[in-house]
Image (cartoon, rainbow, N blue to C red):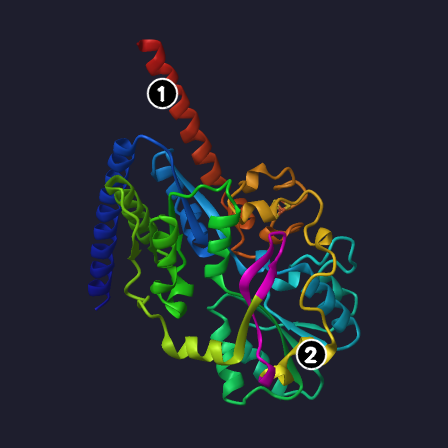
Amino acid sequence: MNYGIDAYRGLISRITKEYSSALVAKIRKLVEYLGNTVKIMDFCGTHEWTITHYGIRTLVPNEVELIAGPGCPVCITPAYYVDQLIKLSLEGIEVLTYGDAIRLPASVGHTPRSLLEAKASGGNVRIVYSFMDAVKYAKSKSNDMVFFAIGFETTMPSVASVILKGKVPKNLSILTAYRYTPPIVKHLLTEVKAVQLDGIIAPGHVSAVIGASSWEFIPKEYGVPTVVAGFEAIDVLAAIESILEMKVKGEAKLVNEYSRVVRWEGNKLAKRAISEVFEVCDAYWRGIGFVKESGGFFKDKFRNHDAVSQYGLRDSPSDLSREIVPGCRCHEVVLGLCKPIHCPLFMKICSPSSPYGPCMVSIEGTCRIWAEHPEALILKEVKSISATLRSMDNKLST
Ligand code: SF4
């Protein structure tokens, strides 16, 4: 029996290896044909992890520039939420947060500097693994608590469906820092002119909820080839190949490479739950600014669950200049305007064990991913040096 499984695994691994090699060879040919640099944004933090972890930047030609995008919810969650939760926790209201958000930096000059520091100073802070975990915990207690609800469309349905079922206990309120993803892509393509993209790898998890069709506007309105992709290295390679092929043909289409999970229309039940509970408003993204119709806030009839109403909190920043800590370039990293290594603080005062900026906090943050994969950066560096040497060699021999 075991032999059968091993043989099956071996077969899959051989097919994957052969298919990946064929894709890389095809990518090389397409790039050669195009003869210019192609900038592709991988929107999602998990795609960036796949690209960096599997060394995809070192596999594809230097002309394929893979740029990380704003798809890490922790990175873009504003500091003013953290400040207010810290205050509540020190006043004795129990704050329930995901493990990564506990280290999210508060506003510039704020002390304690994070919920983790607040906890160390006696703040009432607890890590939970999911909203259901928070609900279960709140039901077992009688004290008042606030759940820090951060994330994109992937995490919204879990909160919305529990609210609709009337299963949220009275002592638990929710601070919604939810953000919608298509508006930030629209913002990127219209407002951030310096990032001229040739292709976009759209997020797989988010698309499983909102549907591949949600990205149709990118090729239609902006002429940028877009591929919804899964998270295996082979998915990303297939997405790159597909984008390059469209560039060669002079087409801009939406391709769903992740059809094993993502449907065109998405998950109708999840979408309905989101739209029943949340209304769409303009919202602030840390360091980026206000993005039109990008925030999910409670509709009036669900205000009884809303921590903003219950505790008189702000749902917009009071001082924009305090959102990004001095020297940190996270707001540029998430928009593809610079790479983590361009930040002077990268792996100096900012590291995974001691994050200074928000992009170093979560496992989906670009700075943290790059920091945890130094070998990928070195390989890329070696590759670019050898490309320079090769071209010098060619020039000398002609
Ligand atoms: Fe911000 Fe740290 Fe990244 Fe620099 S290295 S951009 S300080 S998270």
Mark 1 lies on a secondary structure that is helix
The residue range painted magenta reads: 282-301
> Position of 311 compared to 292: left or right?
right
Dot 1 surroundings within 10 Å: few (below 14), some, or many (20 or more)? few
Residue 257 forms part of the magenta stretch:
no
The mark closer to the camera, 1 or 2, is 2
What amino acid is at disc 2? Ser
Q: Main secondary structure of the magenta part?
A: strand
Q: Is residue 250 above or below residue 183?
A: above
Identity of the residue drawn at 38% across and 43% down = 198
> Position of 314 compared to 211: left or right?
right
Disc 2: which residue: 309
Q: Residue 46's x, y, as percent?
A: 45, 56
Q: Residue 239's x, y, as percent?
A: 31, 50
What amino acid is at disc 1? Arg
Q: Answer with mark 1 or mark 2, whichever residue precedes in sequence.
A: 2
